[in-house]
Amino acid sequence: MSKIDLTGQKFGRLTVICDAGRNRGHVLWRCACSCGNETIVFSGNLRNGKSRSCGCEHAEKARRRWLHKHKANPSPYLADRYEGGSIEDLEDLIR
Ligand SMILES: [Zn+2]
């Protein structure tokens, strides 16, 4: 089965670095995200636009939504804790 070489191509924040093998017949690519992380993604997810960052894009959107929602009741402690954390960590804090 031939595959399309995506090396060097950009998809959102991701730039394809090299082939990362296969998983159950799906081609994987090692990608560099503009935030500095590296991630492995499925070829199909790159090409259909599902994978556009290492996950940081999603985290930033979630963080903005969260900060907007809590504007009426700001908690610097929670906001600080959330810097660099995941949305799951944050949900644990506000539960
Ligand atoms: Zn990223």
Image (cartoon, rainbow, N blue to C red):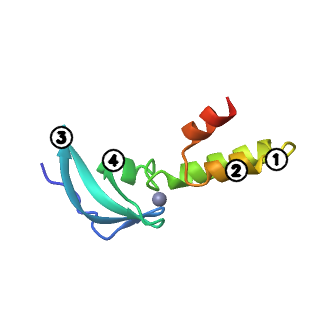
Few, some or many residues within 10 Å of mark 4 (<14, 14–19, 20+)? few
In the rendered image, residue 38, in percent from the top left (x then y), is placed at: 36, 60
**SS of the residue under disc 3:** loop
Residue 84 visible to an observer of this rendering: yes
Label 2, on which residue? 79
Disc 3, disc 4: CB below 8 Å? Answer: no
- Residue at mark 4 to residue at mark 1: CA–CA distance: 41 Å
- Residue at mark 1 to residue at mark 2: CA–CA distance: 8 Å
Pick the residue in front: 63 or 41. 63
Drawn side of residue 51 relative to residue 89, left or right: left
Drawn side of residue 64 relative to residue 83, left or right: right
Pick the residue in front: 66 or 51. 66
Q: Look at the numbered disc 3 and say if its residue's Cβ is closer than 8 Å to ligand 1.
A: no
**SS of the residue under disc 4:** helix
Disc 1, disc 2: CB below 8 Å? Answer: yes
Few, some or many residues within 10 Å of mark 2 (<14, 14–19, 20+)? some
- Residue at mark 3 to residue at mark 4: CA–CA distance: 11 Å
Disc 2, disc 3: CB below 8 Å? Answer: no
